[in-house]
C-alpha cells in the first residue's frame, strides 16, 4: 500500500504536489478559438514523485512525467505519462521509494550499486524534438526517448552507442543547419571536473564530442551558441563527493571559486582552441539567446546575484534572490577581455524564450515569465510565484506584461505562425494553474499582442503540477 506524502514539504503540497494518475482527455473544452494554423504537439516535462520519498525531498528529485497537448484543426487532446526509467520500474515493483535521487548514499542497501551506476536517471526536466525523436532530459543522465503520440517509454537513446555521457536539459538547435549542440557536465564520472560538448547533425547522427577540463566540479544547467561560437559558463555550484560522504550537500554554492566562461569556436577540433574568461560572481539558470558579430559575442541572460535553491557548503540557505535580464558582452578582439554584464531591466524574470528560428542570431523579440507580486509561494526563499507572461522588445528596450491572475504560469513557448513568417509572428503557449479552481489549462496568446490576453484556453479537469521545460513538435 502506498504511503501518504509528507505534509511538511513545500514541494509535496499544492501547487507542486504530484498527481497520482495517468490519463487521456480527448477534445478538451475550448474557451475562445484555437488558431486554425496552429497544428502540432506541446510537451511539458516536470517532476511528479510516484512514492513517498526517502529523506528530504527536493523538487529536482521527482520522478519525471510528460504532459502532451496534441493540437489540430481547432481541437486539443491531452495525455500524460510517467517516464518508465530504470529507477521508476525498480520502485514500481517494490511499491516504495528505494533511492534518494540527489544523494546516492541514501538508498535501500540492495540498490547501492544501482544508485551509482544508473544511466537513465529521472527524465524530469526538459524535452527536445530532433532527428524525428522525442527525447526527455534530466541533465545528469542520458536522454530518454518516448513515443511522441502515446508517450510510451522507449528507452535511453545513446545515438547508437556513441553517447557515453549525460545530456544537458538545454540543447541548442541551429535553425540554418539543423545541427544540435549539447553538453554534459561531470562528463567522465560523478563529481569529475570536466564538461563534454557534443554535436549532432540534422539527421540525428552524433558527429563530434570534445572533452573540456574545467576549473572545478560544477553543475552547469544552460549554455549558449552563436553562429561561430559555443559558450559554456562554469558557475560555482560545486559538486563534492567528499562533502556528500560526510553528510553535507552534494552540490553547494561557493562563490569564492569564481565564474569561468569557456568560449569554444563552433569549428574547433579540441579543447585546445578554448579561450577562458572570468566575470564577477553570479549565476544563470537560463539564457535567452546569443549572437556574435566581428569578434564580439552578445549573450542575454536571466541572471541571479547568487544561486537560488542550492545551499552553501555548510547547508545554510543562500537567501532570497531574484534574477534580472542582463546582457553579457565578450570582446574577443581584446586579449585582456573579461565577461561584462550589464542589467537591461529591473523586473524579475525567468524561463526566457525566443523565436527558435533566430537561435544564435541577432534578434528582436523575447518572452519570459515573471510575477506581479500578488501570488505568494509561502517560502522564505523565492517568495513570489510566477503568474505573469512578459514580452521584451530588444529594439526599443521595452516590455509588455500580462498577469494570469490568481494562478501559476509555466514557461511560455513560442510557435511561429508559419515557416516563412516574420520573426515573432506566431503564438505563445503556456500551461496555467488556477489557484481558485485548482485546475489547469493550456492558454494560447498572439505572441506580439500578449496584453490582449489569451486567444484561447483549453481546459483540463485536473491539475498539471508545475514543471520545468517543454518543447513543440510541428505536425508533419
Image: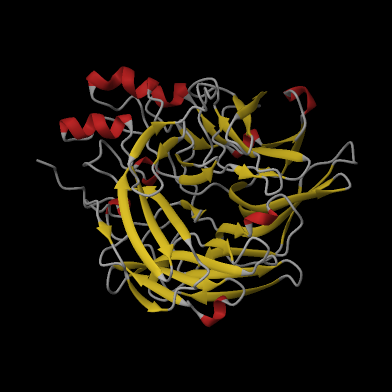
Q: Is residue 385 visible?
A: no
Query: Measured along the vertical axis of the image, is residue 309 above or below residue 162?
Result: below
372 and 289: which is toward the camera: 289
Residue 202's x, y, as percent? 63, 39
Q: Is residue 242 left or right of residue 363?
A: left
430 and 134: which is toward the camera: 134
40 and 282: which is toward the camera: 40
Residue at the far left: name it: 1
Residue placed at 74% from the left, 45% from the top?
A: 226
Residue 448's x, y, as percent? 62, 74
- Picture quadrant where residue 212 is located: top right
> Which quadrant does the N terminus fall into?
top left
Residue placed at 21% from the left, 51% from the top?
A: 20
Q: Is residue 65 visible?
A: yes
Number of marks in picture: 0
Query: Measured along the vertical axis of the image, is residue 69 above or below residue 293?
Result: below
Query: Measured along the vertical axis of the image, is residue 367 above or below residue 22?
Result: below
Residue 291's x, y, as percent? 76, 50
Residue 383's x, y, as percent? 43, 62
Colour approach in the figure: secondary structure
403 and 439: which is toward the camera: 439
Query: Measured along the vertical axis of the image, is residue 155 above or below residue 462?
Result: above
Residue placed at 29% from the left, 74% from the top?
A: 436
Amino acid at each position: 500500500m502506498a504511503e501518504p506524502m509528507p505534509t511538511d514539504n513545500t514541494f509535496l503540497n499544492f501547487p507542486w504536489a504530484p498527481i497520482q494518475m495517468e490519463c487521456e482527455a480527448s477534445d478538451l473544452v475550448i474557451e475562445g478559438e484555437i488558431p486554425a494554423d496552429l497544428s502540432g504537439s506541446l510537451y511539458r516535462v516536470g517532476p511528479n514523485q510516484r512514492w513517498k520519498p526517502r529523506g528530504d525531498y527536493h523538487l529536482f528529485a521527482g520522478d519525471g512525467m510528460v504532459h502532451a497537448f496534441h493540437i489540430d484543426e481547432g481541437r486539443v487532446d491531452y495525455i500524460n505519462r510517467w517516464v518508465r526509467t530504470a529507477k521508476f520500474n525498480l520502485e514500481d515493483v517494490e511499491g516504495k521509494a528505494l533511492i534518494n535521487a540527489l544523494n546516492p548514499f541514501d538508498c535501500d542497501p540492495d540498490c547501492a550499486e544501482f544508485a551509482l551506476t544508473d544511466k537513465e536517471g529521472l527524465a524530469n526536466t526538459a524535452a527536445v524534438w530532433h532527428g524525428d525523436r522525442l527525447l526527455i532530459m534530466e541533465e545528469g543522465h542520458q536522454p530518454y526517448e518516448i513515443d511522441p503520440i502515446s508517450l510510451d517509454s522507449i528507452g535511453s537513446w545513446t545515438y547508437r552507442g556513441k553517447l557515453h555521457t549525460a545530456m544537458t536539459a538545454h540543447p541548442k538547435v541551429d535553425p540554418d543547419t539543423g545541427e544540435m549542440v549539447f553538453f554534459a557536465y561531470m562528463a567522465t564520472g560523478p563529481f569529475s571536473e570536466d564538461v563534454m560538448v557534443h554535436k549532432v547533425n540534422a539527421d540525428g547522427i552524433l558527429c563530434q564530442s570534445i572533452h573540456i577540463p574545467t576549473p572545478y566540479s560544477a553543475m552547469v544547467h544552460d549554455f549558449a551558441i552563436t553562429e561561430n561560437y559555443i559558450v559554456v559558463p562554469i558557475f560555482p555550484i560545486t559538486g563534492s563527493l567528499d562533502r556528500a560522504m560526510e553528510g553535507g550537500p552534494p552540490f553547494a554554492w561557493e562563490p569564492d571559486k569564481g565564474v569561468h566562461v569557456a568560449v569554444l569556436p563552433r569549428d574547433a577540433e579540441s579543447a585546445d582552441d578554448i579561450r577562458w574568461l572570468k566575470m564577477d560572481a553570479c549565476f544563470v539558470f537560463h539564457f535567452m539567446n546569443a549572437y556574435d558579430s566581428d569578434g564580439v559575442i552578445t549573450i542575454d541572460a536571466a541572471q541571479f546575484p547568487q544561486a537560488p535553491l542550492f545551499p552553501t557548503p555548510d547547508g545554510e540557505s543562500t537567501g532570497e534572490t531574484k534574477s534580472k535580464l542582463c546582457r553579457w558582452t565578450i570582446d574577443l578582439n581584446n586579449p585582456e577581455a573579461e565577461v561584462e554584464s550589464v542589467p537591461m531591466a529591473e523586473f524579475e524574470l525567468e524561463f526566457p524564450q525566443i523565436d527558435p528560428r533566430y537561435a544564435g542570431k541577432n534578434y528582436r523579440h523575447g518572452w519570459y515569465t515573471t510575477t506581479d507580486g500578488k501570488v505568494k509561494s509561502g517560502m522564505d526563499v523565492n517568495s513570489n510565484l510566477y503568474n505573469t507572461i512578459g514580452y521584451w522588445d530588444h529594439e526599443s528596450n521595452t516590455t509588455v506584461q500580462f498577469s494570469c491572475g490568481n494562478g501559476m504560469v509555466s514557461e511560455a513557448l513560442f510557435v511561429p505562425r508559419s515557416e516563412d513568417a516574420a520573426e515573432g509572428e506566431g503564438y505563445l503557449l503556456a500551461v496555467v494553474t488556477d489557484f481558485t479552481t485548482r485546475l489547469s489549462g493550456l492558454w494560447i496568446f498572439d505572441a506580439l499582442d500578449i496584453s490582449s490576453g489569451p486567444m484561447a484556453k483549453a481546459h483540463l479537469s485536473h491539475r498539471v503540477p508545475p514543471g520545468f521545460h517543454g518543447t513543440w513538435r510541428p505536425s508533419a
